[in-house]
Amino acid sequence: MSVIEKLNATDLKLSKSDRRLLDYIRENGLNACSAPISEIARSCDVSHATVTRFARKFGYSSLRSFKIDLARELGSEENQGSIISDTIAYDEPCSETAKKLLQINLATLRQTVNDIDPKEVDLIAAKILKAKRVFFIGIGNSGFAASDSAYKFLRTGIDARSCTDSHAMIIEASLVKNGDLVIAFSNSGETREILKACETAKMNHASIIAITADANSSLHKLSEMSLVYAVRESYMETGSINSKIAVFFIVDLLFTEVVKRLGKDAYSTKQKTALALKKD
């Protein structure tokens, strides 16, 4: 049963506080998914704990996973009844669509920022710096993120590599060692090749970090830590800019935290690579 079906069930047994939360979600839709817990609690005149318990009553271990699933459903073609959003019409001018897409992208980023755990970002940044080698893996659209990430980190002096071929990925995973770090990208968290590579790497004692849109996925459960991003895609827009921008935002955040720790060393290393490229 979907989140929306659960929220609309006729046999719900909810307290008065829960009813206020339910009404808030129904009235605010996607905006409720991007709102921080403090705003939700204040708007409904309930405690933070009540908001968290509300999500658990619908089968979720955290408010974050509840909001991610709800946002995904609200963004589906079935619920939007249009190309991307029910606010976008087939016959509207391009300038109007551009403004609406901007708002969708901003909402996606806002939700991603609200849902990110800064402590996990700090821990992952520290792992990147301590790792002997960092492997970024992904397939399809996630492969683009893996390749771009490896390139960014490599230019700061980190031994970063990308792998986007399913066969090569398994080979690399079978050769990783203790001290290596695998950062896996998968929107669904269920990509078969990614899961197999991570399972193999984990058997070889490498650390696994997931960057995914699904906090309840197999990849999330397999990983030591995960960074979950917001996604709002319909059937017609799989791989849309709003999901990509959320992934690249998380990578940029990790990269920035690593550079902050490296300090001047990061600048001098990047300058060195820039000079080498100029000579080419």
Image (cartoon, grey):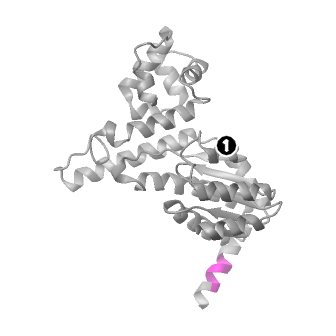
Circle 1 residue:
221
Q: Is 95 in front, or is 92? A: 92
Please name the residue shown 70% across and 59% down the image.
Answer: 182
Is residue 117 rendered to the left or right of residue 110? right
Q: Position of residue 162 (x, y in %)?
A: 63, 68
Identify the residue at image location x=54%, y=62%.
139
Q: Amino acid at mark 1?
A: Lys
Residue 260 to residue 80: above or below: below
Residue 204: x and y, percent? Answer: 80, 59
For residue 17, above or below residue 129: above
Crowd rating for badge 1 (residues with CA inside 10 Å; few <14, some 14–19, many 20+) = few
Query: Which residue shows up at 36% across the image and 45% down it?
Result: 103
**Residue 93 in the image: x percent, y percent?**
18, 53
Q: Is 262 in front, or is 191?
A: 191
Kindly report the secondary structure that dominates the magenta region of the rendered protein.
helix
Corner quadrant of residue 22 = top left
Residue 256 is one of the magenta-drawn residues: no
Is there any visible trace of residue 256 in the rendered image? no
What residue is rendered at 79% in x and 55% in y? 203
> Which element is circle 1 on?
helix
Question: Horizontal placement of 202 versus 49: left or right?
Answer: right
Magenta residues?
Answer: 271-276
